[in-house]
Amino acid sequence: MPTFSAPDGTELAFHVVGTGKPLLCLPGGPMRASSYLGDLGGLSRQRQLILLDLRGTGDSDAPTDPAGYRCDRQVADVEALRRHLGLDRVDVLAHSAAGDLALLYAARHPTHIRTLTLVTARARALGIDFTHEHRMEAAALRTAEPWFDSAHEAYQAIWAGTATDAEWDAGTPFFYGRWDATAQEHAAAEVAQHNDKAAEAYAASGAFDPPTTRAALAALSAPVLLAGELDSGPRPHVAAAVSRLLPGAELSVQPGGGHYPWLDDPVHFTRTVGTFLDRAAQPTAAAGPREDVDDAAEGLAQG
């Protein structure tokens, strides 16, 4: 298992799956071990997945100072991994809460990022969050599911902030496009993979400065956002709002997709991501960031 040292001395681990050009993968949760990403539905057959275990998760050590879990402070970990890998520019894929981390990384290090793939990702770094109304809107799409009646009340409790462990379990089907054996096995592993204390610190006060981040990302090269048709975070229309803040961004909505679209339809997911990455690799597709974007990134480097 390969490891490297973060700037504060924390020993971090990453896992390498597949072959091809490297794709740096940042897990969500927030603060869930990268093992839940698996091989991203077989994407490892097209790209070499570099799966980072964020500090305090999976095989990575915990920081001495718990404040190091804050999202903006983990940007330095991503940059340290890029340097460790010896890559001048990186393709980055981020899932869920790691969308914030990836956006902050791209804003602070625009010259080192080639592509950014945001999969059912958060965008608090840009000033957009998901509301209770968004969650209930998505739930209303699932009324025909055989588990709906038993799960709906629990799902409401989750977003009201009152859910017990049993209610979290009961409401879990809403996070998946298909509540089949694969999804159930995936969900059962979540508790052991998650660092609750780190998650509490991830979006702590001071983590995000949306105006500065939006300015720094004004010329980000060809980002792509993948949303699930049935997902509540983000709903497709919210993902569209995020895409409008990233000039040149593409939005793809996976039919029948939930929060883990590579499980719901691996073929569709890998074809969509693979096509985007292949197209971005063409010489005419990649334009370097402008100097004014580099200047805007200086403000984020002080965080």
Image: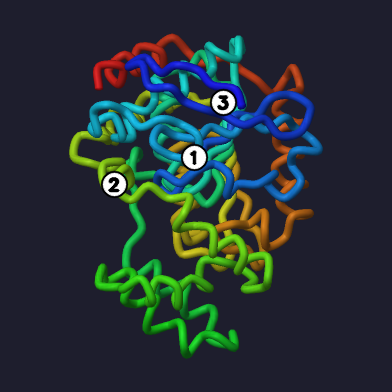
What residue sits 74% from the left and 42% below the top? 43
Determine which of the numbered discs, if any, sits on residue 197 in the image.
2
Residue at screen point 79% across, 35% down: 46
Mark earlier in primary sequence (2, 3): 2
Residue 171 vs 261, above or below: the answer is below
Rendered image: mark on residue 58: 1
SS class of the residue under badge 3? loop
Q: Residue at x 51, y 16 (%)?
A: 289
Q: Amino acid at mark 1?
A: Gly
Q: Are marks 2 and 3 in contact (CB under 8 Å)?
A: no
Mark nearer the N terminus (3 vs 1): 1
Query: Mark 1 or 2 closer to N-term?
Result: 1
Rendering coords of residue 193 (x, y %): 48, 50
Q: Which residue is mark 3?
A: 221
- Is residue 75 rendered to the left or right of residue 272? left
Q: CA distance from mark 1 to mark 2?
A: 14 Å
Q: Disc 3 marks which amino acid?
A: Ser
